[in-house]
Amino acid sequence: MKKFVFFVLVSLLIPQGALAVSIDGKKNESVKISRAERRMAQTITAERLKNYLSYIASDDMAGRNTPSKELDMTAQYLALHLKLWGFKPAGDNGTFFQKMFVKRERTLNTSLDINGKSFKYGDDYVKLSGDMISKTPYVFAGDGWMVKSKGIDAFSGIDVKNKLVVLYSEKPSRGISPPRPDGVTDEDVAGEKGVDWADPATYAKKMGAKGIIVIMSPAIEGRWANIKRFFTRGGASIEGLGNDGGDSGPGLPTLLVSSKVASAMFEGSSGDYKSGKSFDPEKSAAFSIDKQVDRVPTYNVVALWEGSDPVLKDEMVAVGAHYDHVGTNQNAPGDDKIWNGADDDGSGTVGVLAIAEALKDAPERPRRSVLLVWHAGEEKGLWGSAYFNKYPTVDINKVVAQLNIDMIGRSKKKGDTNPKNKDLSGPNEVYVIGSEMMSSTLGAVTKETNTGYAGLKYNYKYDDPKDTNRFFFRSDHFNYAVNGIPVVFWFTGVHEDYHQPGDEVHKIDFNKMEKIVRTIFLTTWELTALDERPAVDKELPPELKRRN
């Protein structure tokens, strides 16, 4: 049974700025925004934010790609301020840095042999994972999915052990792998992965396959030029995270092949991959690759502001942002080759820095400690937050909530009819994601702190795991949620300059940023003051259920 949350503002009995939060009709905690706390928040100013962002999103930072010397310079800039302000280093070995290694691959030579025919890398196929497939028989398994509740089993009647599994689906997909079969809902994949349901890669690995060959769908073949460019320029990953996003180790060797290769695979067979019929046995494939692998360090920046309560200071409220962006593109049209990333996520980066400065200037310390983490590699696939949650430099179980700031710097102007700005929030509006998804207490504190302070319009449009934009899954808070930590994500919306060179400082609405960052600072402060940590008491989305 879900808990119902309601709020009571007793204006005559509670001092100015105080809010009472109730859960199930019982008093849980009081959110008191005192005059002293308001004064602390007011030290965060639009001018400070602009000064910080003018450096971090300057051309000198060259778009802060992961990894790059400019991103390292940004990390040093953050650490210098933290040291001067008296923060405790919370990275590796008494430093503010958590080192990670980016593995970058460069393809030298490859070969693919299908029944004695050779094909050209980049034109006919690309490698998605793995290094080598010796001469191995292959079997066709349709879309490769297993969903027990629907009676779906693509491997039924097929022996895939020690074979290559060939997959194909004509359905459009966000990714490369065949999408879910028709009629399969989130509820159908809420059970145990690999037992109650399995995606093609998981199922193939579980059933003992030696590798996977994915035949391009028509939609993927239509985007082949871009896909080829992405995979042939060399892959990159974070050492220690694996390449399948899970804890089961490296994924199977996997190739993506064109219809030309697929036709060769079925040549002389009675089957046809488009009709879903299997082909005759005794056919084989072999793949090899020579590559060069470089290990390049990059860093999360981690700092702690210790609390004052002798017991509660062992717990932490985490506040974070990603400080990387996507770098430069010398082949881009026009004169501007630098993706400055002022909003994405320079705005979040300096927001967390301003919160750090407000903590330094506060006349007292919060009850709980505040953990500040600037994540690297978010743009590459949430690398930094995934690494920090897998290899934390603090006791991650003592983190009671994580507050994520990603793109809080833009506003939709009156009369703006650009369709790319249609979902950009207004001058007093911000999207809040996740606060209502995991914890009643966190949702209450988040909402009522804002009500009692700046009165921003909190828009919960995207606070839904079924949101087609999937914003809940696309920023660093998600890896904390996977770890069972309640999260909140502040975001002002995508716009015409999202991942474009036009995302520059002069387009930032600093007055709006000031209000948002002040409100997040106060939300942090109120969470540090709770007598008990926010409980995870909501029905979790399937994506979190199957990971916790």
Image: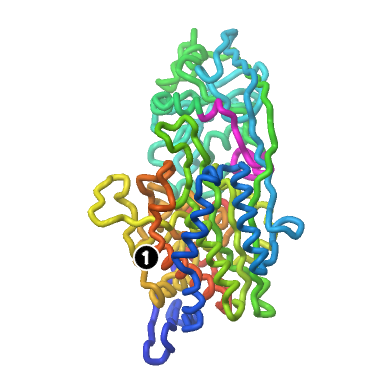
Instruction: Please tell me whether residue 350 is drawn above or below residue 501 in the rendered image.
Output: below
Instruction: Please tell me whether residue 515 is drawn above or below residue 110 in the rendered image.
Output: below
Residue at (39, 37) in percent of width and height? 182
Instruction: Please tell me whether residue 111 is drawn above or below residue 445 in the rendered image.
Output: above
Q: Position of residue 141 (x, y in %)?
A: 51, 26
For label 1, the residue is: 458
Q: Depth check: 361 or 163 in front? A: 361
Q: Position of residue 395 (x, y in %)?
A: 69, 63
Residue 248 falls inside the magenta stretch: yes
Residue at (47, 78) in percent of width and height? 38
Q: Is residue 166 visible?
A: yes
Among all residues in the image, which is located at the extreme right? 93
Among all residues in the image, which is located at the extreme bottom? 13
Q: Please state the extent of the stretch shown in magenta in the rendering.
A: 230-249
Question: Is residue 17 left or right of 165 when viewed as pictured?
Answer: left
- Identify the image quadrant of residue 259: top left
Q: Position of residue 21 (x, y in %)?
A: 44, 79
Task: Give the structural element (helix, strand or loop) at label 1.
Answer: strand
Residue 386 falls inside the magenta stretch: no
Residue at (73, 55) in percent of width and height? 92
Q: Amino acid at mark 1?
A: Tyr
Q: Position of residue 465 (x, y in %)?
A: 43, 53
